[in-house]
Amino acid sequence: MCVDGMYWHYFDKWLFALYRFGKHTNDTKLVTEACELAMRAHPYFVAPGSGVRWKLNVDASPIPDLEAPGPSSDALSAFLLYSLLPLSKDRMTEDVRGPARVYVQYVASGGISRRRLDPLSFGLQAWEAQWMPPPIRRRILAFLRACGSEALDVRSGMQLPFRLYGGLMGAILLRDEEGFDELAKHAARVAWEIGLEYEGNVPAGSSEHTAINKVMLAAALDPWAWERRGFEGDLQVA
């Protein structure tokens, strides 16, 4: 994994973790670090007005055979992060506003209901949904409710544990939403029983995914860290 490249959907979670921990502990240095990392990475990950490259080479160059950046969940998460961080450069937010808006329109039109989600995609959709305006959030939650059991199937999910753990995190985040109580309880049991036992028996560095597996399990075990706070308003994409 050390030469696999850089993924936006993990880099943005690192930015969010720095921001959230910095705000919680009143450590402005962590929030500043998140802002500086975002500004440094922006020119490499973001195609202004088009979208976000979901993956880069290890030297931060674009991957030639990867599909062109477009409206996507990654564009939405970039817009979310840039809206939360106290960035001095509004240009960065504007660079991703358009593709984020198009993706939200796609979701609002029911386009998301035609997709099949793997566990990690389920978890990321659940995380982002927290900041969506109520009508769009209701659509996303209805879809997640319908596909939750299939998306979080443990037998298939444990083939790539880190992706399952991301899904478990999302399900636990939804524990107070209507219709998610049992799924959230199931997700918590899987994380605390199956996840902890599995990771406890797999030494760090023994395979290519051990580091990300353990990081994502930690995220599932502490979903409160990923919850929207009361002072964070609905995301205004339009």
Image (cartoon, helix red, strand yellow):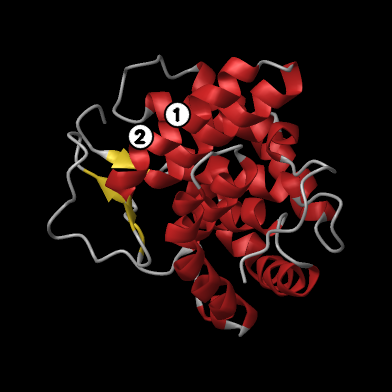
Residue 62, label in figure: none
What is the quadrant of residue 53 in the picture? bottom left
Q: Amino acid at mark 2?
A: Arg
Q: Is residue 138 above or below residue 129?
A: below
Dot 2 alpha-carbon crowd within 10 angstroms: few under 14, some 14 to 19, many 20 or more: few
Q: Mark 1 sits on what residue?
A: 36
Q: Can residue 98 be seen at all in this image of the molecule?
A: yes
Label 1: few (<14), some or many (≥20) within 10 Å?
some
Q: Residue at x 61, y 66 (%)?
A: 237
Mark 1 in CB contact with mark 2 (< 8 angstroms): yes
Total numbered labels:
2
Q: Quadrant of the N terminus?
A: top left
Q: Quadrant of residue 10?
A: top left
Q: Nearer the viewer, residue 146 or 10?
A: 10
Q: Nearer the viewer, residue 71 or 220?
A: 71
Q: Which residue is mark 2?
A: 40
Find residue 155 and report its horizontal and vertical position in percent: 51, 49
Q: Quadrant of the C terminus?
A: bottom right
Q: Look at 20% across and 34% down and name the residue there.
A: 58
Identify whether 177 is placed above or below 26.
below
Residue 31, image x, y percentages: 59, 25
Q: Is residue 104 above or below residue 171?
A: below
> Is residue 210 depicted above or below 115 in this figure?
above
In front of the other: 107 or 177 = 107
Which residue type carries mark 1? Answer: Glu
92, 209: nearer the viewer: 92
Taking the image as shown, residue 142 lies to the left or right of residue 214, namely right
